[in-house]
Image (cartoon, grey):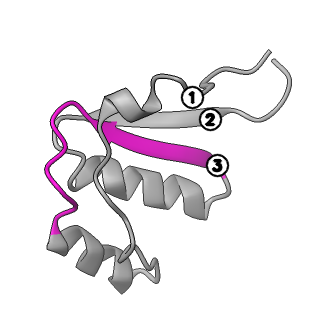
Amino acid sequence: MTGSARVLVVCTGNAARSQMAEAFLSREGIAAASAGTHPAGVHPLTIAVLAEVGIDWSGARSRGIGEMLDEPWTSS
């Protein structure tokens, strides 16, 4: 495989766990995104917990999986 790998973390609400996974992966320099099958908005505690470890996630938003379908998730 050539090029950089990209990671898509998918869950139901894209409100907490997938958002946190995206934030931590991104902090490590990994191209990451997250989405949900039924986006519910980013939970305020997600933003607060990430802030505690120095990640500003205040501008994040919940995305639906449909927004990610046309993105390239593999490299050749």
Residue 4 placed where, x, y %?
77, 35
Q: Secondary structure at mark 1?
A: loop
**In the foreground, 39 or 22:** 39
Q: Which class describes the residues within 10 Å of circle 3: few (<14), some (14-19), or many (20+)? A: some
> Judging from the image, what secondary structure is the residue with disc 2 in?
strand
Q: Please, what is the three-letter code of the amino acid marked with disc 3? A: Ile
Residue reaching furthest to the right: 2
Above or below residue 27? Residue 31 is above
Is 41 a magenta residue? yes
Q: Would you name the residue on which mark 3 appears?
A: 30
- Three-letter amino acid code at disc 1? Glu
Magenta residues (range): 30-43
Q: CA distance from mark 2 to mark 1?
A: 10 Å
Q: Nearer the viewer, residue 75 or 49?
A: 75
Where is residue 38 shown, x and y percent of the image? 15, 36
Q: CA distance from mark 3 to mark 2?
A: 7 Å
Disc nearer the start of the sequence (2/1): 2
Residue under circle 2? 6
In the rendered image, which quarter is residue 72 located in? top right
**Does residue 44 sit above or below 22 in this rendering?**
below
Q: Position of residue 40 (x, y in %)?
A: 13, 50
* Spatial separation of the CA atoms under disc 3 and disc 1: 16 Å
Q: Amino acid at mark 2?
A: Arg
Neighbour tally class for label 2: few under 14, some 14-19, many 20 plus, Cα within 10 Å: few
Residue annotated with mark 1: 71
- Left or right, 10 with respect to 45, comes to right
- The residue that appears at 35% across and 77% down in the rendered structure is 58
Left or right: where 26 falls relative to 10: right
Looking at the image, tell me whether mark 3 or mark 1 is earlier in sequence order.
3
